[in-house]
Amino acid sequence: MQGLVFDIRRYSVHDGPGIRTTVFLKGCPLRCLWCHNPESWLLQPETTVRKNRIGNDTFETTEVVGKYYTPTELVSIVEKDYLFFDESNGGVTFSGGEPLMQPEFLEQSLALLHKKGIHTAVDTCGLASAERYKAIAPHTNLFLFDLKHMDSATHKRLTGCDNELILSNLRLLNTLGADIIIRYPFIPTANDSKENLNAMVSFLSALKGISEVDVLPYHKIAAHKYQKMGIGNWDNAPSEPTKTEIEQVVSFLKNSGYKVKVGG
Amino acid sequence: MTERIKQLREQSLRAINSISAERALLVTEYYKQQHVAARPVPVQRAESLLHIFSKKHICINSGELIVGERGPAPKATPTYPEVCLHSIEDLDILDSRPKVSYKVNDEVRKAYSDTIIPFWKGNSQRDRVFANVDEQWKEVYASGVFTEFQEQRAPGHTVCSARMFRMGLKDIKAIIDGTISTLDFFNDPDAVAKREELQAMKIAADAAIILAHRHAESLTQLATKESNPQRKAELEHMASICQWVPENAPRTFHEALQHYWFIHLGVITELNPWDSFNPGRLDQHLWPFYQQEVKAGTLTEEYAKELLQSFWVKFNNHPAPPKTGVTAKESNTYTDFALINVGGVKADGSDAVNDLSYIILDVIEEMRILQPSSMVQISKKNPDRFLHRALKIVKTGFGQPSIFNTDAVIQELVSQGKSLEDARNGGCSGCVEAGAFGTEAYMLTGYFNLPKVFEITLHNGVDPRTGKRLGIETGNVSTFTTFNELMDAFRKQLKHFVDIKIKGNNIIEKLYGRYLPAPFLSLVIDDCITNGIDYNAGGARYNTSYIQGVGLGSLTDTITAIKHHVYENETVTMTEMLNALENNFSGFETLRAKLLYETPKYGNDDDYADQHAVEIFNSFLELIDGRPTSRGGTFRVDMLPTTCHVYFGTVIGATADGRMAGTPLSEGVSPVQGADRNGPTAVVKSVAKFDHLKTGGTLLNQKFTPAFFNGDEAIARLGFLVRTYFRMDGHHIQFNVTDAQTLRDAQKHPEKHADLIVRVAGYSDYFNDLTPELQEEVISRTEHEGF
């Protein structure tokens, strides 16, 4: 059994505690308007052109985005940094795409890491069957769970899917006693209305034990990726939130009783 | 920072680096005396120091609390014609060169042409060096395979011990008398030579005492004229201190600093030793004075800080003696490498961090000046708080302090044969060199250009730059059918060139022992007195000579590229590759892109490339480590470049890693600039694959933007990175914290960034003082943005 991975980043410091290696799995059920990782959408390898520059000259090579690994192969790569994990109480984070699009690969990889005593985290959009969450929960030390919008219709407009299943999965994980950090991608005009923030806080207050909300301010770093993947029109991108706007959101969440980190 | 310190700091920053002929004239005046020739050589050396210290101008700067200038004014830098005689042409170059210049006025030129040059021409140590090494050495030296540290500057490379903070020169003279009285004139054939050396040491001690007393007189005179009662009291107090130290052991914090400074001046005036001199473990040496005085209520933390800051200014007032030619290229900086050590462990192995360690870190942060350099020793026993405090200073972006692994340094020193206590009392000096402080003479002898040897291997022993046959014939590489044949040929060439270097070292070492002993330095390093042997002749307890390997990253990538493309994937033939290199990739741009972008590189935790770094290092080590030196010491290796990776790059054509002809090599043990693409954990893992404990120092430079240090959590993560590297026995890591945009702007508008200090390679320097190539190199070092 193999999983499709599009990137492995070491010294990743925004995806959970300590020094971590983040594994990005390819394939995502959502199509968020602001997506940073368009190369993660399709659950299949894609051939792209890479441009290597030397001075003013450009040299093109083809590059395949997405590589297959067995869980054992993947673990042998990520465990290269075990000393850093040990030293920093760090570990491995699975992100994507949506890692639960490849449930068996994910479950086996998590189980293997746990066997080696390595801390695991899963960064999820919340959209997968409840069974899949139940299967990985025992091998997952921490969930980084995205809440993009509380209103289902708006959620559908922004991401292509409604949010009922997402919210019910969050309740499920909470019932299972999982450690969860909420991640709120802050997209100006799209999901920063007062109503949405209130709805989010009110939803979370009904859950027990969730204490941290990370604010991920939207930024335009991905423009070149869209060009490279040959998709979408980046001209209509939202604007980046200002420092003051970020501070306002942070203080709202803090006042609501949550530990808040910007950038995760 | 107090007003006084602000002014002293400003004065030091504003002072113009210039050449002073004072010392050269005094030393000439001494040697011109008729009776001198009959004196034993060590006595001549000590008396010349006595002559200088009895006659030189005493400079006391307004407001300062620690006194003593080597020259007649701050940054007025003396010359050492008995070591290296500058020609008028040399002086013109020093005066006018765009970087690291020293102003030379007409008076100095006249002193040189009328007095100094006529007396010393043909008689300097540099003349002796070039007269004694053979033609083969000279040809190889000229080709840039290696450099020679001792051709313009005396050996030194050593550090003060705790003992010197507990003893006055008077006490040391009494010990010398004791040693003289026990000399065995019946059985020891060297007894006479030892007596001469010991007598010279006593004269040298007197020289420093006289210098201090002359300062006391000047201070007293200034005090009588001073109208401000507070300053008047200070001057009187300082006069009494200079009357007391260094003759007697210091009793107070203030005395301890002044005591050390006179010793420092003694060492750097006697000769122009590399790395000037160094108080070493300052937080340990000063701790008893600090603790006792704070308890007694005679010293406050604020005043201790002010004294330390005044002490800091003294270092900054003393740029490196002027260097020219290859020596200037290998060490192109005003920095003279006094490296203050803070932290680490005590002789009993316990955590040495104390309140003063933190106060010294405050001083480093506030002063923000080039000299002295500073470092923290981090042992597993030191608290994270200490490391984090240091990292917060690193964040401010002037490259200090650098971070060293105490536990690795101790293992390095012990494995070289030092006692555990001597090793624990040690640390690092210069750029990154491990040493047993106060007991070891660990001399750097020259950089060794590893990629150049490989280039010569590719040309069957011929230097393609000059067409000269420098190496041995190891075969036409185009006819080799396996990668191993190529590596065998490289190892043969490497042995050939290492042997030439070592032969030269053994000759030059002897010349220093015989013609330029250092009786003053011998007073302060154990066991020169007990042995009755000069520091430069092997009198220290431990004697080590280093050869410093340069270009590990570049050579690893070069060899990896050839293995990958020529021998395994057959992308190109060796003949085509040689053709591409000869043409500096002109017409071979696509191949170059492949070499740069589609080839495994060192620094990415990829064994395919990293195994060659291990292999190159081990070959170099085996050829050098443990061989005897002519002063009874041992040869060892370390891996650091200062600025030599730039010079060495200029003598090498294009290389198979995609590097263009003449451009800089990788520095230290860092990956090739821009070749590390998997983040800092991958870098430190690659770098830790060879055994740092077999070296006397390695240098790893990592460039980060300031954003990388934002917040306590980010600092903690960097702390983890450092700790993990040290768990893997990494020797040293330093961080450059500046964004490329700022550096680019500084290139365009140097006037706006005069205070911009960057980490170069084991030391920090003003960005504006770097050569354009070095500026480019600093910019191109991988920026770990966005992690």
Image: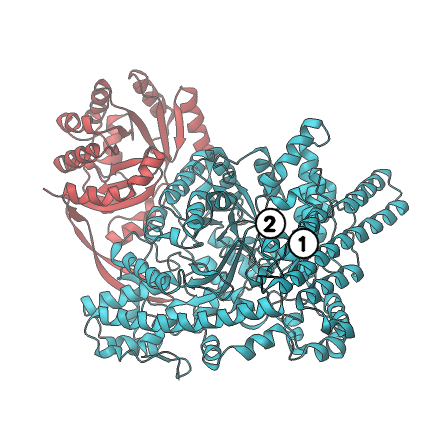
Chain colours: A red, B cyan
Nearest to the observer: residue B331 or residue B655: B331
Residue B316 in view of the camera: no
Q: Quadrant of residue B472?
A: bottom left
- The lab-note entry on whether marks 2 and 1 share a chain reads yes
Q: Position of residue A109 (x, y in %)?
A: 17, 37
B756 left or right of B773? Answer: right
Q: Quadrant of the C terminus of chain B?
A: top left
Q: Position of residue A260 (x, y in %)?
A: 40, 27
Residue shown at the point (29%, 56%) measured from the top left: B610
Residue shown at the point (58%, 68%) measured from the top left: B512
Chain under callout 2: B
Nearest to the observer: residue B201 or residue B754: B201
Residue B625 in view of the camera: yes
Instruction: Give the residue number, with chain letter if any, for mark 1.
Output: B181
Element type where label 2 sits in the image? loop
Q: Earlier in the sequence, mark 2 or mark 1?
A: 2
